[in-house]
Image (tube, rainbow, N blue to C red):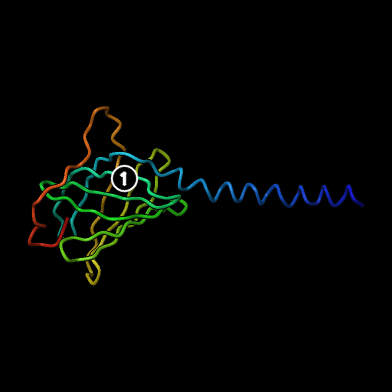
Amino acid sequence: MMMKRSAMAALVAGPMMVGLLGFAAPAEAQRNGLYQVSGVNPDGSPYTGQMLVQQVGLASWRVAWQIGETRYEGYGMSAGPVFSVGFTLGNHPGIAIYQLGTDGSMTGQWTLIGSSAIGTENLVPWDAPAQSAPQQQSSQPPANPAR
């Protein structure tokens, strides 16, 4: 009887450990570093820039976009293959939701809270050495609240 309980415990504990390890893996799937950004604003205009992603907790991240002369900042959370970021554009709060790719890239959509329009954005890890992170800019956000 003792042998059966040990075997049963191992059968139950094995899948539980795999489940727990699988739960911790999404935070590891997200990468620290610099990303190349290409996107389309809700009005259809394209933009490019950079995004710096820095891990600040098990599944939480600080992000900073540099789009043209303007810097946008926010905080994100990874959960499974999803990376979500809250940010502000001037006085307008927004949210972006990305799907993580197996190569470390991200594809997503973003919107400003209260808006019916949606923009799209693609992020590709910037693997080139000696690239600098986006720098703080004193520029004001554009008059049209789009990134």
Name the residue: 38% across, 49% down.
56
Q: Nearer the viewer, residue 79 or 90?
A: 90
Which quadrant is home to the C terminus?
A: bottom left
x, y percentage for residue 133? 22, 39
Please, what secondary structure does the residue beneath circle 1 have? strand
Q: Nearer the viewer, residue 117 or 141?
A: 141
Looking at this view, name the residue that lies furthest to the right.
1
Q: Nearer the viewer, residue 119 or 36?
A: 36
Instruction: Reply above or below: 112 against 105.
Output: below
Total marks placed: 1
Q: Nearer the viewer, residue 100 or 6?
A: 6
x, y percentage for residue 9? 78, 51
Name the residue: 23% across, 65% down.
93
Q: Residues within 10 Å of mark 1 (few under 14, many from 20)?
A: many
Residue type at the position of mark 1: Val
- Tell me which corner region of the image, top left, top right, bottom left or bottom right, holds residue 111: bottom left
**Is 22 left or right of 4, judged from the image as shown?**
left
x, y percentage for residue 46? 15, 50
x, y percentage for residue 125? 31, 38
Name the residue: 10% across, 62% down.
144
Q: Which residue is mark 1?
A: 53
- Tell me which corner region of the image, top left, top right, bottom left or bottom right, holds residue 30: top left
Name the residue: 15% across, 59% down.
146
Instruction: Reply above or below: 60 against 123.
Output: below
Looking at this view, name the residue that lies furthest to the top.
129
